[in-house]
Image: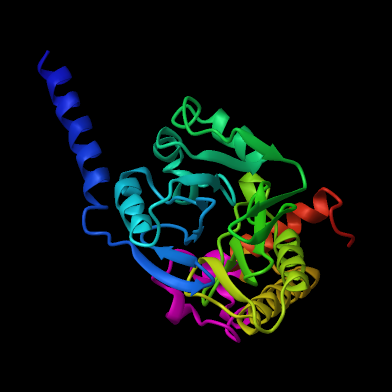
Amino acid sequence: MKSLLSLCIFTISLMATAQGRFDNVQIKVEPVGDDIYMLVGAGGNIGISVGEDGVFMIDDQFAPLSDKIMAAIKTVSDKPVKFLVNTHFHGDHSGGNANFEAAGAMIVAHDNVRKRLAENEKTADAGLPVITFSEDATFYMNGNDIFITHVHEAHTDGDALIYFAQSNVLHTGDTFFNGRFPYIDLARGGSITGDIAAAAKGLMLINDETKIIPGHGPMGTKEDYKKYNTMLKTVAGNISDAIQAGKTEDQVVADGSLTNDFFTDEETKDDFISGEKFRRTIYQSLIKEKETNIIED
């Protein structure tokens, strides 16, 4: 009985700690233009379009932040969230799904996002997308043609880009980390080749005046996006050359010169994705792609 009581106390303590880490998070509302806003808190950047048709929302961060996010939205619109699009399934982008669903939002995502969320017992019972797509979808709302397109095997296997045509705003989800090395989830369908292709596809949708809401980092421009794509291609090329030269994974991870043209190991040592982690990811991705014939030797 005593051990059971101790376990209960420990579990409650963990839950309180998880909740408590969001207590001091503030949701910042940044105007993007034409009644589109970027919301920054903890987790992926949120995008919202507001107008007479209601609120069109992209991503929702973590569940404990839902009340704060809803309150932030109310500072720019008295309309309900009508549609909520998940750019992919990761919890810092979809963790609030159940809360927003309960508030009346219809959740939209790629087919694989629903599959991934349904496989997880923590997210299988509520907050699943009720509208899914395999390639593209278009919404007509608040004076915008909102074009959603799937990008294959990029950050994950279920990523989407969302482009507001009339407002000329692009939300990239985690296929674009502005000002840092990206996280590519190899275990869940991501790949460096797909991430490069995703950036190339996004660049085809936009022009020099486009404002970009990245998955993480500050609001970006086409020039930022181009630099990011150049970084991905250059580092992938450097590591591919190292593989061809017979370098092992550990040798590639230890070689900061492969990524130093963009960010040094010292600059990224405290980042979620350090230079060493990024090089390991790219190495593993390229090896995996060769083994599965995604790319040619």
Q: Which quarter shows the N terminus?
A: top left
* Res. 250 visible in picture: no
Residue at 51% x, 31% y: name it: 120
Q: How many labels does the image show?
A: 0
Residue placed most toward the observer, 113 or 167: 167
Q: Is residue 191 left or right of residue 127?
A: right
Is residue 92 a member of the stretch shown in magenta? no
Q: In this view, does 64 lie to the left or right of 294?
A: left
Where residue 42 sits: x, y (%)? Answer: 37, 58
Pick out the residue farthest to the right.
296
Vertical position of residue 196 compared to residue 184: above or below: below
Is residue 257 a member of the stretch shown in magenta? yes
Q: In this view, does 281 lie to the left or right of 289?
A: left
Pick out the residue farthest to the front.
52
Where residue 130 sits: x, y (%)? Answer: 60, 32
Quarter-wise, where is residue 147 in the image? bottom right
Where residue 195 sits: x, y (%)? Answer: 70, 62
Q: Which quarter shows the C terminus?
A: bottom right
Residue at 64% x, 64% y: name it: 164
Residue at 59% x, 48% y: name it: 88
Residue placed most toward the observer, 234 or 78: 78
Vertical position of residue 86 compared to residue 247: above or below: above
Pick out the residue farthest to the left.
2
Quarter-wise, where is residue 171 in the image? bottom right
Q: Is residue 247 left or right of residue 68?
A: right
* Res. 21 visible in picture: yes
Residue placed most toward the observer, 2 or 55: 55
Vertical position of residue 151 compared to residue 242: above or below: above
Q: Give the range drawn in magenta.
A: 253-278
Snapshot colouring: rainbow
Quarter-wise, where is residue 199 in the image? bottom right
